[in-house]
Image (tube, helix red, strand yellow):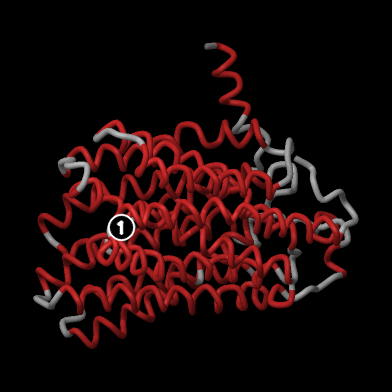
């Protein structure tokens, strides 16, 4: 037990203070994420529109995030990650409050687009900030700390949001707005350039700053982005088709579904840092990314071949979560290591866009396949695609290794 505690605490050591402040900013920001999970209910129950119209609002939000990811990457390279984060948090906070005051369907659609665009400027800038305040030795753990903050924030925000929505939907918009603004205040207090000595990135990038490669011409990276989009499309099913499957096919109650879904965040919060600490540096990044995708694929296939109800749901969510833990931090580290201070926004923007595109395509395509062909076919497709993507990740690794004259197989 003592060794476990020592290993656990060691996973958090050696991170720069700025990484902890960035995680705190993210935690406060995500704790206020209450509007989006309840947006469909707000539109159908409070605004009295159809489910189809409510779904269009969510789609518009997704389109805004794609535009925001692209623009956020461009602005990060142009004016720096600090200013972009500040603009996103203050602008997004204000627009959340404004959105709560809109009383027509058209005005809600328009405001939703600009809100999602401004709000999504934050992600590429925040990712660039994490890369800036870390080095290759602790970069993956810095990213994992940020993911821990996201998971905690989502858990707290979702829980509180349910109670708030039961009393007042409008209050959700005010809370979202003020938590964004609160995160901006924290950013200004602890991470503004005037208060924080900024390291010389020319030293940190080991000469990479002389090579200003466009992310849009980086073929291994573009292939990686395609694979990441496919992975994200599969992963997002746990928030859309999976709960429906648990309810209709496994006959779980809403309470049981909630417990199983909460297991995902709980495993991430408790064990992700320790797992990453023990894995980091022992294999190539793409080996871990591919392994995570493989586990996600196995998770979906298990739904078709393993009997059980609650136990099957727990097995599935455990496999998916471990796959997520192994894939996501190392995937983000991959793009950070390919970039430098002058093109980091482009790389971060494309990575953000891949998730935004998947958030639109994944739920829609998964629901369509399940509705037309049934859940069994959907799980075979998702499992097969996830497992086959391992070959793609190996190809990315081979191309990346060839660029640096490293051996193609390091696993």
Report the side of 255 relative to 186 (left or right).
Answer: left
Left or right of 200, for residue 119: left
List x then y, in percent, for residue 388.
57, 55
In the image, 365 versus 306, the foreground residue is: 306
| Residue at mark 1 | 240
Residue at the image position 49 percent from the left and 72 percent from the top? 87
Q: Is residue 230 above or below residue 343?
A: above
187 over 280 or under it: above or below? below
152, 287: nearer the viewer: 287
- Residue at 16% x, 65% y: name it: 41
Q: Name the residue located 13 percent from the left edge and 71 percent from the top edge.
A: 44
Q: Could you say which is closer to the camera, residue 325 or residue 388? A: 388
Where is residue 177, by image quadrant? bottom left
Structural crowding at the residue carrying mark 1, measured as other residues with C-alpha within 10 Å and reported as few (<14), some (14–19) or many (≥20): some
* Residue depicted at x 63% and y 59%: 129
Residue 179 percent location from the top left of the image: 35, 58
Q: Is residue 259 left or right of residue 387?
A: left
- Which image quarter: residue 4? top right
Q: Residue furthest top?
A: 2
Q: Position of residue 209 (x, y in %)?
A: 83, 66
Q: Secondary structure at mark 1?
A: loop
């Amino acid at each position: 037990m003592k060794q476990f505690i020592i290993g656990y605490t060691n996973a958090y050591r050696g991170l720069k203070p700025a990484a902890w402040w960035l995680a705190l900013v993210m935690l406060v920001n995500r704790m206020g994420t209450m509007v989006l999970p309840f947006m469909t209910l707000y539109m159908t129950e409070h605004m009295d529109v159809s489910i189809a119209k409510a779904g269009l609002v969510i789609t518009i939000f997704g389109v805004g995030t794609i535009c925001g990811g692209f623009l956020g990457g461009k602005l990060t390279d142009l004016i720096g990650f600090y200013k972009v984060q500040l603009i996103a948090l203050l602008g997004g906070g204000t627009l959340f409050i404004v959105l709560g005051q809109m009383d027509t369907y058209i005005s809600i659609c328009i405001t939703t687009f600009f809100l999602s665009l401004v709000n999504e400027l934050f992600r590429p800038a925040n990712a660039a900030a994490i890369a800036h305040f870390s080095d290759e030795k602790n970069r993956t753990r810095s990213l994992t700390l940020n993911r821990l903050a996201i998971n905690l924030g989502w858990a707290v925000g979702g829980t509180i949001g349910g109670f708030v929505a039961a009393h007042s939907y409008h209050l959700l918009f005010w809370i979202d707005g003020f938590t964004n603004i609160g995160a901006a205040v924290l950013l200004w207090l602890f991470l503004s350039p005037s208060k924080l000595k900024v390291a010389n990135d020319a030293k940190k990038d080991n000469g990479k700053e002389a090579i200003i490669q466009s992310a849009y011409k980086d073929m291994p990276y573009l292939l990686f982005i395609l694979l990441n989009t496919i992975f994200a499309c599969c992963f997002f099913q746990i928030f859309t088709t999976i709960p429906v499957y648990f309810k209709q096919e496994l006959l779980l109650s809403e309470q049981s579904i909630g417990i199983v879904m909460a297991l995902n965040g709980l495993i991430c919060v408790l064990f992700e840092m320790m797992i990453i600490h023990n894995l980091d540096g022992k294999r190539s990044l793409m080996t871990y990314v591919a392994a995570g995708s493989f586990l996600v694929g196995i998770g979906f296939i298990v739904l078709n071949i393993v009997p059980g109800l609650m136990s099957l749901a727990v097995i599935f969510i455990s496999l998916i979560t471990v796959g997520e833990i192994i894939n996501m931090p190392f995937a983000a580290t991959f793009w950070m290591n390919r970039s430098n201070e002058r093109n980091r926004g482009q790389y971060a923007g494309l990575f953000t866009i891949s998730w935004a595109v998947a958030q639109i395509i994944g739920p829609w395509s998964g629901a369509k396949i399940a509705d037309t062909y049934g859940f069994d076919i959907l799980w075979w497709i998702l499992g097969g695609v996830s497992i086959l993507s391992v070959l793609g990740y190996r190809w990315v690794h081979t191309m990346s290794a060839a660029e640096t004259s490293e051996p193609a197989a390091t696993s």
